[in-house]
Structures are given as structure tokens and as C-alpha cells.
Amino acid sequence: MSVTDASASAKRWRFREPSALGGFWPSFSFVVLYLSIIVLIPLAALALRPWELGLEGVWRVVSSERTVAALKLSFGAAAIAASVNAVFGTIVAWALVRYEFPGKRVIDALVDLPFALPTAVAGIALASIYAPNGLIGAAFAPHDIRIAYTPVGVMVALVFIGFPFVVRAVQPVLADLDRDVEEAAATLGASRWRTISQVIWPAIAPAILTGFALAFARAVGEYGSVIFIAGNIPMVSEIAPLLIVIKLEEFDYAGAAAIGLAMLCVSFVMLFLLNGAHALMTRRGAA
Amino acid sequence: MPLEIDHIRKTYGKFPALGGVSLRAEDSEFIALLGPSGSGKTTLLRCIAGLEVPDSGSIRFRGESLLAQKVRDRRIGLVFQHYALFRHMTAAQNVAFGLRAKRGKERPNNRQINARVEELIALVQLDGLAGRYPSQLSGGQRQRVALARALAIEPRILLLDEPFGALDAKVRRELRRWLRQLHERTGLTTIFVTHDQEEALELADRVALLKDGALEQVGTPEELYHQPATPFVFEFLGDVVKLPCEIVDGAAVFAGARAKLLGGSLTRAGSGLAYVRPDAFDIVVGESEGLKAVLRDVVSAGASARLDCLFDGGEPIEIRAPHDVALQLKIGDRVTLRPREARVW
């Protein structure tokens, strides 16, 4: 209920509403402590480290041609892969929720496989299949299309590791969607297309966006599965996380931190925007 | 004859939901489909709406077959038990949905749609709430939005599937009265599914009582209440006490006490099982002609009192009596119960 009590605004502001159920302070303290140790302090260290290069030095690292190309590839491929997953993940979730068919439970379990597999194993498997002499790569090779060792290969790996996120985000929402609502739309004279676009889509769109954001965030940081299939050619198929590792191996810790900081900033802005869009979508009619 | 339902059969797997049901509805008639859960009443409603396809039989509206038409072409308004409102649309947008879904030249322009929505919102008495989302409305208000939404398409028939089932008793009674008034104003042929006999008897012009996928009795509320065709009808419309009796000269005799025999097989003689309403007993303190029992407990229950008695044979019986009668009794009293009227089938 968003109907606010008029007297509530007159009350003095409180850090939290009094509750009969105790345990707020222990859990709140724990959250602050835990988040600090696990997230905030490491990120603060990351944010502080690059500046030993000086502002100009940081800028030189971040704006170098190779870094820009790597960042573009990392974020671009992650965005495309998450979009692909948003479309096909939704279709898979739809099939799993709406229809009964033999083998449904097996397929449902298979969806989680990219979560469970060590990413390096996935990377090697993908690389061998999509390489020009591999099972799928061989089919494309005669047409002069190469997948492994190109940006397309990076995308394939990112689609693979991001796939479960959209399915698992959309599935429960679709399952929760009442048949009633679709039937009501039909009795009101709506075509099937109108029902899908105006009744079902608004209900599941926030979940698809959540799945997209998760798949995107995962893909941006992905390392293990990508490096095997990417070929890692500088300026072409070299992802930003790999560039960071290369800098570390050269003992250029500040340079690595500078690229890390750049990734952090872009990721933060994108997640902020995605969350904003999500809030806009769900504000209406959220019960 | 606007609506003719003829021998509708519907089976789910091996479970026969409807076993050849036939029913007719007059113009502007308000019919209640009454029955326990699993009796097929909702299935029948969904067949009329087009959400279920019957195995056989026909449904005609003014002569044309409804079964040949798709759900969206039938123009039959349906109100669901759990409202089925579009959560991401305001009340007004919900009501407008059916108007916006119209195709071609049937589709009104925006100004006409807004005017119609305003009119309907006023009709269901939700003025000022048109901009609210369903989550910001109470259950009763939501159901009125759902009703306005169904009425927006100017349906040929209005179907309601236990529309007040999810509401509390007081709101339910208010909406019931209001729905009856609305029906008198719109004159729309209405079919209403409920398992609440009180609701059916109060609202409907005619009640169709279903049991196990077949019609048990169709008639006015008075007919059902006063001339129940079967023991099931009698039991469904109120509490019943079943007692063995002797039938002598067209009267039911309970241990020497004579009760008027209503309906049933009046000419039969011999012993039978009498169906008596719990409030159709005379209670006499002490022993005389009639059923002897001991009063175990008196519970004040609303307008009358419930008396828990124990027959001498050890069988318990619950009857009802006005408070002034109950006040003259003490727990532990020996009483004699005399049924005033009984039914024997």
C-alpha cells in the first residue's frame, strides 16, 4: 500500500521504525561490517592505488589505444551477450514454465550448468568446438567465418556464462503470472499479440531487465572462459580483465589498478542506470 | 430465448466435470449456479465464456452458436474470483482495456473511450479512484473495477465466478445488494457462480443447483427452499437433522409425537428417514410424547441459541431455538423434542 498516513509526515524522523521484532542492531552492524570487509575496503584500495602514477599517468594508461580497445570489447561484448541472453533466456523460461514435455526436468537442470562448470573448462570446451577445426567452427570455416580467436568468440563465451541468469530471473515471475489475467484479456476481446505485449510483457519486463543486468555484470568481469576462445590478440580480441593480468605480470600494479578503476566506474554507472530503469518499471503497480 | 445451453458434457481426463447439462436463461434474467466445489459450476461458466471447450453439446445465444466463436469474439463479460486485474494499469486503464482492444471502425476514439471509462467508474462508484493501481485498492474496490472492465465491452451476457468469494462477510453483503441494484439498472442477462446458498437465494431470479456435474434442481429461490426436489437440495440449502420415523396417515411420527409431513412421498406408509430443519422443533421440559433427551449445552449463536442434546440411546443432536425458549432451560434438564414438520423421501 502506498497510501501514506498523514500523521506519519508530522512525526520526527527516525533512523528506523520501532518494531516488536528485535535483532535490528545486531544484523545492521553485521551488514555494515561485512560489506566493509568484503566489498568497500578492497574497492577503496583499488580506487586509491592508481594515483601514485599521478593524474596524468592514470589518464595515459586508461586512454591508451590498447586499453580503450580492451574496454570497448569487454563492455560491448558483455552488452551484446546479455541482450542475446535476455531474448533467448526468456524464451527458455517461457517454455519451461508454460509447457509440459518429456525431459523438462533435465533441461531445467541443464540451465544451471554454466554456473557449476569451472570457467576454464568451459573456455577450453568452447574453444575446441568453435575453432576452425572444431565441431561447429568447421561448419563456418568454408564460408570464411571465424568464431574462435575473434570478438565473436568472446561473445560466444559470454553468452554461455550469462545464460542462466535471465532464465532464473524470469522463470519465477512467469510462473507467478496468473492464467486469470490472460483469460481476462481474451474475454475482453484482446488478440493474443495484444495480450502478450500489453499484459504479459509489462509483468515480466522488470525480471528480464534484472536478468540482463546480472548477465551483463557477470560477463564484464568474466576471465576464465574467455581467454581460451578469444585468442587474445591486442586491439582485436583482448578483454580488459586480461589486460589487467598482463599488467600485473609486468609488476605494473598501479597501471593494473588504473584499468580496474576505469572498469569499476563504467560498471557502476551502468548498474546504476539499470537499477533506475528497473525502479521505474516496477514502481507502477508494485504491491 | 437468449441463452440456450444444451447437453454440455466436459471431461477432464477421466473425471466427468459436466455430464450433459441443459439450462436456459431469459432476457435480463439473473441466474445463480449453486453447488459444492467440484460440482462443475465454474466449468459450465468457463464453457459459456469460451475458456473451456466442451466435449459435446451446444451453447446458443439468440440462435447463433457460441461454440463456433473464439473467446475474444463472443463479447461475454467475465468477472473472476481473484479479480484478474492488470496490475501495471490504473483502474481507468483496466476499464479502458477492452475498448482499446476493439478493432477497425468498432474502436472508439480516445475521447469516447475516456468518456465511457468515466461513466463506468461512476457506475461502480469509484469516483476519484480511477488513477489508482489495483494494489492501492481494497478487495471490494478491485472487484468493482473488474466489473466495470467487463461491462466496458457492452457484453451480451455477464458471467461472475464467485466474485465475492475472497471478500469478508460485511463487504460481501454490501456488494451483493449493490450488484442486484446494478443488474436491475442494466438489465443484463447474468449468470453467477457461488457455493454460498444464502448469496444465491438472495440474488438470483432462478437458482440452478449442481451436483457432480448434473443439475439437481432449477427454480426460483422459493421453489428450491420450499419444494426441494431431492434430499441433496434440502441439505444444501440449510442445516438438517436426520431422524428415523414412522409414517402414519400422512404424518411423520416420532415416538408418539406427530409432525406435519411436507412434500416427498406422502402416501407411503411404514418407517422412513425424516429430514428436519434444526429450528423446527418444539422443546418441552420433562418427559412426554416425543424424543427424549438430556440437554448438554446451550450456546448463544447470533439470533438464536444452539442446543446440544443427547438422546437416551446415546446419539447426539443439535437443534436451534429462540433465546427466550433457551433461557427457560438448564443444562442437564431432561427434555422432550417434538419435530413440527419433516420431509421424507
Image: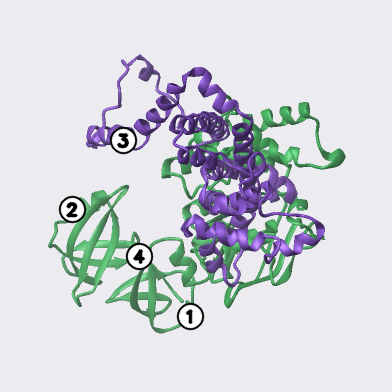
Subunit under mark 2: B
Subunit under mark 3: A
Tell me the residue that label 2 is attached to. Answer: B328
Of badges 2 and 1, nearer the viewer stands 2
Subunit under mark 1: B
Name the residue: 46% across, 45% down. B167
> Which of the chains is purple?
A
**Amino acid type, callout 4:** Arg
Of badges 3 and 4, nearer the viewer stands 3
Subunit under mark 4: B
Name the residue: 49% across, 64% down. B36
**Amino acid type, callout 1:** Thr
**Amino acid type, callout 3:** Ile
Position of A32 with respect to A148 (left or right) is: left
Q: CA distance from mark 3 to mark 1?
A: 91 Å
Q: Residue furthest right?
A: B105
Mark 3 Cα within 10 Å, few/some/many (few <14, many 20+)? few
Label ID, residue A37: 3
Tell me the residue that label 1 is attached to. Answer: B267
- Both on one chain, marks 3 and 1? no
Asked which secondary structure carries label 1, the reply is: loop
Label ID, residue B340: 4
Compared to residue A216, the image places residue B216 above or below, namely below
